[in-house]
Image (cartoon, rainbow, N blue to C red):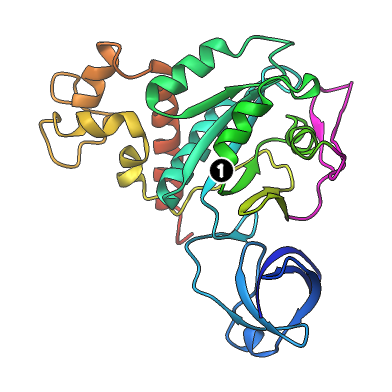
């Protein structure tokens, strides 16, 4: 019998089988021996409520641990907490490196407009949705992007991931996060990665909130390839291996595109910050 792991708590795995039945299974011992751990999103073979085989993965994310996703929905709130654009650009680079689609949701647009940010990232080439999750505004547009996909929701605690997922299902299937009135930061409530079946062949995952994002698997010398809008200007650089950081704008196609307004200065500044961060971590890799 084949199935998909939709939740993992301790050594138990909740699985939807090919007949849409829910099973609670364990994993056979050989996986530990082979240093393989089943994770949410894995397509598996089960026998007598035991996982006997993990099928080849399309992709795998270490944090949060999930496999076979097709797109990541990055949720930001426009206020309380305010949007972290540097984090978003790190996440988008990560998605590009993983080879999956990205959707950017700007939530709480009733508190502050998300129009300018939406315009910026649409110009780059990303799908964006401006939402008021509490009022169900933007929900139908998001549903259209989720159809027939396996998507994971990501973003800082308190931005409204769980609120959006509850609105999609029209019931409280996740515990909504709370906002600390003292520091306006989200209090993390989601404790386990869970895959929910919204409709046939449409799965979405809620993940524990986080405020940092490690993208060290991207080499700093390849970071420019993970910024969508940079790609068509890299060939205009005078030197192969141009970093687009230290070179003169006359010799760098990317810098020239920034000067000409073809690349957002905000995105370029974040690129430089991420580049320096990755470069520094590369230098310290053996410390």
Say whether residue 224 is left or right of residue 129: left
- The residue at the far left in this view is 238
Residue under circle 1?
72
Q: Secondary structure at mark 1?
A: strand
Q: Which residues are magenta?
A: 171-194
Relative depth, front residue between 213 and 104: 104
Relative depth, front residue between 148 and 178: 148
Q: In the rendered image, which quarter is residue 162 located in?
A: top right
Q: In the rendered image, which quarter is residue 172 located in?
A: top right
Q: How many marks?
A: 1
Residue 41 locus on image (x, y percent): 63, 62
Q: In the rendered image, which quarter is residue 49 located in?
A: bottom right
Residue shown at 39%/20% (left/top)? 123
Say whether residue 19 is left or right of residue 285: right
Residue shown at 74%/69% (left/top)? 15
Residue shown at 86%/39% (left/top)? 171
Relative depth, front residue between 217 and 120: 120
Residue 174 within the segment the image draws in magenta: yes
Main secondary structure of the magenta stretch: loop
Above or below, comparing residue 168 to residue 108 in the picture: below
- In the rendered image, is residue 268 in sight? no
């Amino acid at each position: 019998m084949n199935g998909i792991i939709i939740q993992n708590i301790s050594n138990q795995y909740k699985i939807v089988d090919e007949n849409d039945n829910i099973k609670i299974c364990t994993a056979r011992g050989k996986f530990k021996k082979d240093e393989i751990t089943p994770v949410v999103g894995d397509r598996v073979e089960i026998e007598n409520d035991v996982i006997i085989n993990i099928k080849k993965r399309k992709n795998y994310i270490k944090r949060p641990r999930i496999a076979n996703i097709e797109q990541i929905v990055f949720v930001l709130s426009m206020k309380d907490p305010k949007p972290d654009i540097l984090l978003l650009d790190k996440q988008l680079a990560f998605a590009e490196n993983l080879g999956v689609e990205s959707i950017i949701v700007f939530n709480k647009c009733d508190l502050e407009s998300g129009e300018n940010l939406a315009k910026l990232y649409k110009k780059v080439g990303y799908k964006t949705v401006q939402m008021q999750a509490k009022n169900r505004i933007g929900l139908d547009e998001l549903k259209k992007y989720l159809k027939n996909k396996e998507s994971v929701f990501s973003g800082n605690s308190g931005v409204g991931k769980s609120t959006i997922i509850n609105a999609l299902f029209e019931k409280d299937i996740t515990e909504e996060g709370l906002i600390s009135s003292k520091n306006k930061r989200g209090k993390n409530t989601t404790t386990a990665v869970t895959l929910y079946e919204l409709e046939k062949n449409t799965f979405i995952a809620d993940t524990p909130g986080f405020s940092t994002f490690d993208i060290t698997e991207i080499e700093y010398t390849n970071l420019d390839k993970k910024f969508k809008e940079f790609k068509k200007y890299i060939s205009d650089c005078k030197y192969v291996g141009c970093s687009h950081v230290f070179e003169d704008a006359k010799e760098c196609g990317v810098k020239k595109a920034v000067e000409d307004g073809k690349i957002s200065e905000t995105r370029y500044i974040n690129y430089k910050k991420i580049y320096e961060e990755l470069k520094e971590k590369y230098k310290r890799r053996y410390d």
